[in-house]
Amino acid sequence: MDNNSKFIDIQNAEMVFNTKQGRFHALRDINLTVRKGEFVTLIGHSGCGKSTLLNLIAGLLRASDGALLCANREIAGPAPERAVVFQNHSLLPWLTCYENVHLAVERVFGSTESKTKLKERTLAALALVGLSHAEQKRPNEISGGMKQRVGIARALSMEPKVLLMDEPFGALDALTRAHLQDELLKIVAKTHSTVVMVTHDVDEAVLLSDRIVMMTNGPAATIGDIVNVRLDRPRDRVALAHDALYIEYRSAVLEFLYHRQAHPVKEAA
Ligand SMILES: Nc1ncnc2c1ncn2[C@@H]1O[C@H](COP(=O)(O)OP(=O)(O)OP(=O)(O)O)[C@@H](O)[C@H]1O
């Protein structure tokens, strides 16, 4: 069997939260496999369970039922092989960019590698996200986009098997966001990382993904449909804006979100 085709393997996963109001069935019957080197996005309306699914893969939550495997091993808790980038970068404010990344490098490789090698790894990760010039700055001295790049550098410095991203660009303005999406595409082309990313943004999903996993509304949300994005790489956002296939994929996701899964909560006019 080709293990790389089921690098992440989720079988019949269920997630039930025990709350003060009783049991809340968040996810039902989740079946998903992710190939090695694949870029998968999770999209769906607010509250459908995207972060919950990502946290199950991260090992930050345990499924109530079903099986979750990464590289043929059960996901039993968080581990550096599954690095997470959150929306709010979560950098330690009293440490420089270098030190924030070095901390992660030391945790993963500190017991087996020399100090020189750890330093090399830290500098390489910062260079990968184009932040060599800012290594001695603290988080309050850099922009939101730069902070998010440090978060990505920190995650990549651990050489994870899987990069998990929970709306990593959600808090950024549109231009910074576009710039970081382009950078992420280049980084992933270089590192061949396997990525699972939560997003609300249809264009982001089509631009970045090999597959877009579209989730139904909760409670008891599940995977409603999957779009296979067969656009050549490298991808150019400006050229794609006029690409018939790109427009078709975009329409398929919009159709799913706004017709097939029209949000049940009425927004105020
Ligand atoms: N620890 C928890 N305890 C109880 N309920 C929870 C818990 N975490 C999430 N939920 C519920 O599970 C559902 C899915 O939440 P989740 O955060 O995964 O959604 P989401 O799709 O990521 O939402 P958003 O797009 O708004 O971030 C929601 O109804 C949420 O209230």
Image (spheres, grey):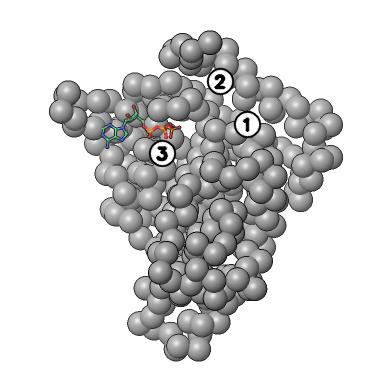
In the picture of the structure, the residue carrying the numbered disc 3 is 51
Q: What residue did someone put label 1 on?
A: 202
Q: Are marks 2 and 1 in contact (CB under 8 Å)?
A: yes
Calculate the distance from the C-alpha at mark 2 to the C-alpha at mark 1: 10 Å
Q: Is mark 1 on a helix, strand or loop?
A: helix
Left or right: residue 3 versus residue 57 is right
Asked whether mark 2 and ligand 1 are closer than 8 Å, the reply comes as no
| Residue marked by disc 2 | 257
Q: Residue at x 25, y 31 (%)?
A: 16
Q: Which residue is rendered at x = 40% and y = 28% of the image? A: 47
Query: For this view, does 207 lie left or right of residue 237?
Result: left
164 left or right of 220 in image: right
> Picture coordinates of residue 99 (x, y %)?
46, 74
Q: Looking at numbered disc 3 in the image, what kind of residue is underneath it?
A: Ser
Q: How many discs mark residues in the rendered view?
A: 3
The relative height of residue 126 versus residue 255 in the rendered view (above or below) is below
The reply to whether callout 1 and callout 3 are in contact (CB within 8 Å) is: no
| Element marked by disc 2 | helix
Callout 2, which amino acid? Leu
Image point (38%, 22%), residue name:
218
Which mark sits nearer the N-terminus, 3 or 2? 3
Disc 3 CB within 8 Å of nearest ligand 1 atom: yes
What is the three-letter code of the residue carrying label 1? Val
229 sits left or right of 158 in the view: right
Asked which secondary structure carries label 3, the reply is helix
